[in-house]
Amino acid sequence: MFELISIWGEEAFHSQLHSSCRNYDTYRQISQCMIERGCDRYTLQCRVKVKELWNTYHKAREANRRSGAVPMSCRCYEELDAILGGDLTPTAKGTVDTLVARMPVESGLSQEEEILD
């Protein structure tokens, strides 16, 4: 399991899984890395285990956020927190253009108002 977490935590794999809904090829690459490290894991096994770890981590994290809750943990919580600390979605449903979000808002007529004039 620690091998899987260390491979999953590599920036290339984590960003691929985060940015795509169709990520069979990424899990296949993770499986190949597991085989190279001496762990025989099929693509589907890697996918199921990553999703299981993701769900377990987020259940523990959400339980810990509730006030008055008894602290909860899961196996490998610290390692998973390093990978998923700010990630609240298993996969992104689409990309966001962050450049648009950072552009200053101009005062004056909007495009709709200009068209209507």
Image (tube, rainbow, N blue to C red):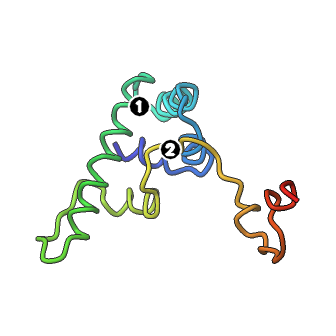
When asked about the image quadrant of residue 23, the answer is top right
Please say if 100 is above or below 90: below
Pick the residue in front: 95 or 9.
Answer: 95
Packing grade of label 2 (10 A; few <14, some 14-19, many >=20) is: some
Left or right, residue 97 beside residue 60: right
Give how far across and how far down residue 51 sits, in percent: 36, 39
**Numbered circle sitting on residue 77:** none
The answer to whether residue 69 is above or below residue 9 is below
Q: List x then y, in percent, for residue 68.
A: 12, 77
* Quarter of the image that includes the N terminus: top left
| Number of callouts | 2
SS class, disc 2: helix
Q: Which residue carries the number 1 mark?
A: 47
Q: Which mark is residue 7?
A: 2
Q: Residue at x 44, y 50 (%)?
A: 89
Q: What type is the residue that disc 1 sits on?
A: Arg
Task: Look at the picture and state if 42 lies above or below 51.
Answer: above
Q: In the shown orientation, is residue 115 left or right of residue 53?
A: right
Q: Is residue 27 left or right of residue 11?
A: left
N-term-proximal mark, 2 vs 1: 2
Q: Nearer the viewer, residue 111 or 91?
A: 111
Residue at x 46% of width, y 63% of height: 86
Which three-letter amino acid code belongs to the residue tagged 2? Ile
Query: Badges 2 and 1: C-beta atoms under 8 Å apart?
Result: no
Residue appearing at x 30%, y 59% in the figure = 77
Q: Position of residue 47 (x, y in %)?
A: 41, 31
